[in-house]
Image (cartoon, rainbow, N blue to C red):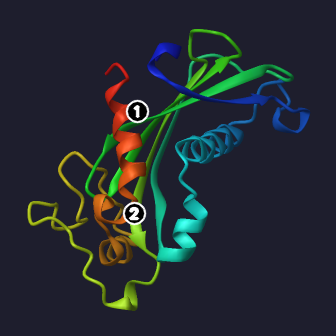
Amino acid sequence: MSREQFWFFHPFRVRYSEIDGQGVVFNAHYLTYFDTAITEYFRALGFDQYADAQASGIDFHIVKSVIEYKAPVRFDWELDVGVRVARIGNSSLVFELAIFLKGGTDALVTGEIVWVYTDQNPSSGHDPGIDAGADRDTGASSGAVRLPHTGRNRFKAGMKKIPRLIAKPMLQRIERSVGRLPR
């Protein structure tokens, strides 16, 4: 993954509290970098995810996270974390992320985060509106992540179609960002 594949970056500087005994960023911190960068990505798109979740009762859940370590990331390095939406499903978003040295071109770490949009109050009786062609177990469209058996019913009951629930302008901004990036 290269820098040119991203239009959005969020800067970080590795703090002493984030490194392990070998002087390398401890593995759990990469997900924090990714999560923070996704939040800032939505902020750059003009979408307040927290306010939307509070108002609508609908939010995202992470169902998959992958981290690939290509090179060590060390104390006090200045980093740029790139974020892009790789795929928009009926009820999921797939993010691709990469961590670069500030101004660097080669990814030190890459990742994928999959979010599923769910009703936070499944007892509301609201029809989740899952496609007829969707996977019967998860409600996910073909190619989307399969949920583990644990908690599957909770997710299935709360699944929502993204296009109906995310503000249309925000969805269009995401789609434009997907379209302008190389595959």
Q: Nearer the viewer, residue 20 or 97?
A: 97
Q: Nearer the viewer, residue 26 or 9?
A: 9
Q: Amino acid at mark 1?
A: Ser
**Which residue is rendered at x = 57% and y = 43% of the image?**
38
Q: Residue furthest right?
A: 16
Where does label 2 land, which residue?
A: 117
Horizontal arrangement in the rendering, residue 72 relative to residue 22 (left or right):
left
Q: Nearer the viewer, residue 52 or 90?
A: 52
Image spot of residue 101 (x, y percent): 69, 15
Image spot of residue 36 (x, y percent): 66, 44
Q: Secondary structure at mark 2?
A: strand
Q: Which mark is residue 177?
A: 1
N-terminal-most mark, 2 or 1: 2
Horizontal arrangement in the rendering, residue 68 relative to residue 32 (left or right):
left
User: In which quadrant of the rendered view does residue 156 lie?
Assistant: bottom left
Image spot of residue 79 (x, y percent): 72, 23
Label 1 packing within 10 angstroms: few (<14), some (14-19), many (20+): some
**Which residue is rendered at x = 40% and y = 41% of the image?**
174
Q: Quadrant of the C terminus?
A: top left
Q: Residue furthest left?
A: 133
